[in-house]
Image (spheres, rainbow, N blue to C red):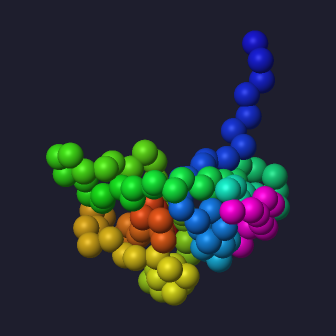
């Protein structure tokens, strides 16, 4: 059987470089690829990273989605040590806090391209 290794989750965006820099501010990961069509962040430990591909006609998902709304294909869970401080940093970097919050100990935010991500304290 062949070997499989996950290297990254890929998010569509009209601005790969801008979205990569947003997540770089949150995660502190180094930028590996950086051009207008494709950007990649990888953690120092070599684990799976995030990639961003240019999609000129990207339509942000709706959170929470209703009938007929564009739906998210995935969301990112990001562990933090201080929820309120992490939300403040994310908002300063360009995130929006979602109006609907399903849990008290999790904050759903939207990145600059509209992808939902969750900040949580374990």
| Residue 24 position (above or below residue 72) | below
Identify the residue shown where x is 69% and y is 62%: 36
Residue 26, quarter of the rendered image:
bottom right
Q: Is residue 19 magenta?
A: no
Q: Position of residue 27 (x, y in %)?
A: 66, 69
Residue 38: give x, y in percent of width and height.
69, 55
Q: Seen from this angle, which residue lies furthest left?
A: 67
Q: Is residue 82 above or below residue 24?
A: below
Q: Range of the magenta residues? A: 27-36
Along the viewing direction, whichever of 4 and 65 lies nearer the viewer: 65
At x 65% / y 77%, what residue is drawn?
25
- Which residue is painted at 77% across and 18% down in the image? 2
Residue 34, magenta (yes or no): yes
Q: Position of residue 10 (x, y in %)?
A: 60, 49
Q: Does residue 50 appear in the picture of this structure? A: no
The answer to whether residue 65 of the structure is visible from this angle is yes
Q: Is residue 120 left or right of residue 26?
A: left
In the displayed structure, would residue 91 be above or below residue 99?
A: below
């Amino acid at each position: 059987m062949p070997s499989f290794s996950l290297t990254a989750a890929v998010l569509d965006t009209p601005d790969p470089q801008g979205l990569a820099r947003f997540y770089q501010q949150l995660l502190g990961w180094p930028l590996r690829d950086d051009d207008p069509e494709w950007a990649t962040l990888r953690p120092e430990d070599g684990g799976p990273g995030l990639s961003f591909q240019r999609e000129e006609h990207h339509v942000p998902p709706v959170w929470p989605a209703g009938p007929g709304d564009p739906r998210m294909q995935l969301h990112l869970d990001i562990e933090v040590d201080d929820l309120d401080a992490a939300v403040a940093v994310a908002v300063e970097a360009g995130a929006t806090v979602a109006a609907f919050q399903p849990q008290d100990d999790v904050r759903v935010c939207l990145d600059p391209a509209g992808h939902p991500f969750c900040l949580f304290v374990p």
